[in-house]
């Protein structure tokens, strides 16, 4: 039993957020009530709107409140390269890094038969249609370097290999500033296998 | 520029929460969109309700959506002791610790002339009225052990000393399980000054 029934409900509701437990939820609740009710009201409004209004782009399955997302709608982006990703967060990571100006396709997950996630759930039909419509020179497989991500990349490679002239996988190796001494063995194996001519 | 305008707004709105920066807000947004829209909708609803519906108890200034909060309305609690606190979170801490069955009064802060917070902002008039109505045997000053908390405790002592027979301050000293070796000097001074007969 906490301060009041409504406050108890809010403390509980905040715990749907990732990484937020009872203590953090209590802190959030009291902070907003004491210091920022206006901000709390705005959060409630935008959150409600987003939960109902955000759907999926009809071309690339990215989150979007429009039929076509901002990346597919942007005429200045190049159709020559299509990058396939597991999640919309990965788009943000690539955009923030800069340098890529092509198109995206979001799988929203990876193949995982044990969870009932097969090609259909990942929109492989839509990916095939997208590849046919864009006719990219290259499809970049940027799924994660996990067993499931690798399996998904292999599946997509087999699916598209007769439709696209070049299918690539993002490089895996030692990160910028990484010191060999502290890098895990798996990464070092990838770094060695992926070595290139010194230019 | 993020995934979509509505998602950008939500990522920004989440940053009103304490301890939540751009990365955390992005994680919360995508997590709810991907895994728990129902929970997100419920959070939006309860949050909106709480921001508008939670006011202050007319007797003790605790947060409450009713005119009188659950602690003041509870007939089983004792009027003999009134505990004065800086924040509603302190009520929760005392309730969770257990053992206290008296009444509360919440200041919502401490005296801080530099921020324009004087006796009026802390509801000292209301505290006086509450003491007159309850006629407690004891007022326990449980403001924090900071310069401002101490100044506030002194102010309340002077305000109430002719109205209440016993005014006490919560003990400050070595916490349970604390090892002297690792305790700060200020706490040790308090622990020495507050020493009691060994029984």
Image: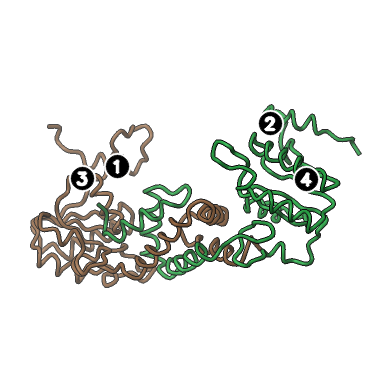
Chain colours: A brown, B green
Same subunit: marks 2 and 1: no
- Between residue A152 and residue A18, name the one nearer to us: A18
SS under mark 3: loop
- Between residue B82 and residue B145, name the one nearer to us: B82
Q: Are marks 1 and 4 in contact (CB under 8 Å)?
A: no
Q: From what the image shows, is residue B175 above or below residue B4?
A: above
What is the chain identity of the residue bearing mark 2?
B
What is the chain identity of the residue bearing mark 1?
A
Left or right side of B108 for A36: left
Left or right side of B150 for B8: left
Whether residue B97 is visible here, answered yes or no, is: yes
- Picture disc at residue A189: 1
Q: Dot 3: few (<14), some (14–19), or many (≥20) neighbours within 10 Å?
A: few
Task: Tell me which residue sits at (77%, 45%) in the image.
Answer: B160
Residues at marks 1 and 4, CA–CA distance in whole angstroms? 74 Å
Task: Tell me which residue sits at (24%, 66%) in the image.
Answer: A61
Which residue lies most toward the right here?
B199
Give the quadrant of the C terminus of chain A. Answer: top left
- Residue depth check, mark 1 versus mark 4: number of the one nearer the observer: 4
SS under mark 2: loop
- Between residue B59 and residue B150, name the one nearer to us: B59
Residue on which disc 3 sits? A98
Q: Dot 4: few (<14), some (14–19), or many (≥20) neighbours within 10 Å?
A: some
Same subunit: marks 3 and 4: no
Residue B41: name its quadrant: bottom left
Residue on which disc 2 sits? B183
Q: Dot 1: few (<14), some (14–19), or many (≥20) neighbours within 10 Å?
A: few
Residue on which disc 4 sits? B160
SS under mark 4: helix
């Amino acid at each position: 039993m906490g301060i009041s029934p409504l406050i108890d409900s809010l403390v509980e509701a905040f715990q749907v957020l990732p990484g937020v437990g009872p203590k953090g939820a209590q802190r959030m609740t009291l902070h907003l009530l004491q210091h920022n009710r206006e901000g709390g009201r705005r959060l409630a409004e935008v959150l409600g709107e987003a939960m109902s209004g955000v759907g999926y782009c009809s071309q690339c399955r990215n989150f979007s409140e429009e039929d076509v997302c901002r990346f597919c709608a942007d005429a200045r982006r190049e159709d020559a390269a299509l990058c396939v990703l597991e999640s919309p967060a990965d788009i943000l990571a690539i955009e923030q890094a800069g340098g890529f100006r092509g198109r995206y396709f979001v799988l929203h997950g990876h193949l995982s038969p044990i969870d009932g996630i097969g090609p259909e759930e990942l929109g492989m039909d839509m990916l095939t249609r997208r590849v046919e419509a864009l006719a990219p020179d290259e499809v970049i497989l940027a799924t994660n370097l996990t067993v499931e991500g690798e399996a998904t990349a292999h599946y997509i490679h087999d699916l598209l290999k007769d439709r696209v002239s070049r299918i690539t996988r993002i490089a895996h190796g030692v990160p910028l500033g990484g010191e060999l001494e502290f890098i895990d063995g798996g990464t070092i194996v990838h770094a060695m296998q992926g070595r290139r001519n010194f230019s």
